[in-house]
Amino acid sequence: GQNIDQPTEMTATEGAIVQINCTYQTSGFNGLFWYQQHAGEAPTFLSYNVLDGLEEKGRFSSFLSRSKGYSYLLLKELQMKDSASYLCAVRDRVDSNYQLIWGAGTKLIIKP
Amino acid sequence: IAGITQAPTSQILAAGRRMTLRCTQDMRHNAMYWYRQDLGLGLRLIHYSNTAGTTGKGEVPDGYSVSRANTDDFPLTLASAVPSQTSVYFCASSVGAGAAYNEQFFGPGTRLTVL
């Protein structure tokens, strides 16, 4: 079956670094996405990994290990505006289509 | 308009009523999606359309129907609303639905309450 796990909530301090983990079980893996969602708003794209390794984009980096079914999102130099939910989604093959399977999201609380 | 728009922003609906949520995109994306988002659960796919004229069922299609008469519009209809359909509904689109890198862009959402 399909399963995406990520922590429900995390707390971090402004200026620090935080790592949000995501583990997954899918049958036809074809890429992993991270999205950011501020309260009451739509999800917005952060990163995409399809090959193993680290993808860096400014303060945000995302890592993928396909053999371990594991990804993480690393946020550096945390700012108050980073308080949001972070959604992990895996593209999986369902019947003859590719669909995104979503985790429940990790609510990140940034404290001064 | 730019991106994806949804209407209404929010709605309170009596159980048993029919309701259509509207979604329009101006990016000429081929693929469109409807999700619902409930507290503690991930986004769940209701229906999708890989291209104009075609639709498919997602994870939770019961009680919902869609149509895709053209590239831009992808309305979602609740034929007879029930309280369990209380949720936030997001419409999304992507360039295509194939295996290549395929970011989805989301509309602002419709908050629906069924009483």
Image (cartoon, coloured by chain):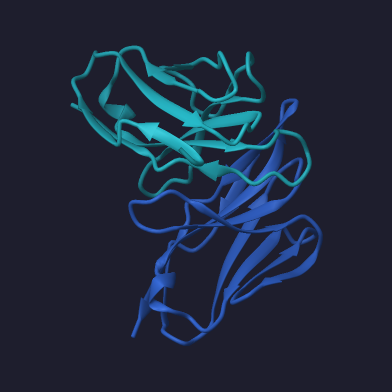
Residue A93 percent coordinates (x, y): 73, 35
Please name whichever residue, A45 or A9, is drawn nearer the observer in this view of the structure: A45
Residue B4 percent coordinates (x, y): 48, 38
- Residue that appears at 45% across and 40% down: B107
- Residue that appears at 55% across and 25% down: B72
Please name whichever residue, A2 or B81, is drawn nearer the observer in this view of the structure: B81
Please name whichever residue, A82 or A73, is drawn nearer the observer in this view of the structure: A82
Q: Is residue B101 above or below residue B30?
A: below
**Image side of residue A37 versus residue A46, left or right:** left
The hue in which chain B appears in the rendered picture of the protein: cyan
Q: Quadrant of residue B20?
A: top left
Quarter of the figure that contains the C terminus of chain A: bottom left
Q: Is residue B30 above or below residue B52?
A: below
Residue B16 percent coordinates (x, y): 24, 13
- Residue that appears at 45% across and 19% down: B62
Quarter of the figure that contains the N terminus of chain A: top right
Q: Is residue B29 above or below residue A16?
A: above
Q: How many marks?
A: 0
Q: Quadrant of residue B83?
A: top left
The hue in which chain A appears in the rendered picture of the protein: blue
Please name whichever residue, A54 or B83, is drawn nearer the observer in this view of the structure: A54
Residue B24 percent coordinates (x, y): 47, 29
**Image side of residue A46 versus residue A16, left or right:** right
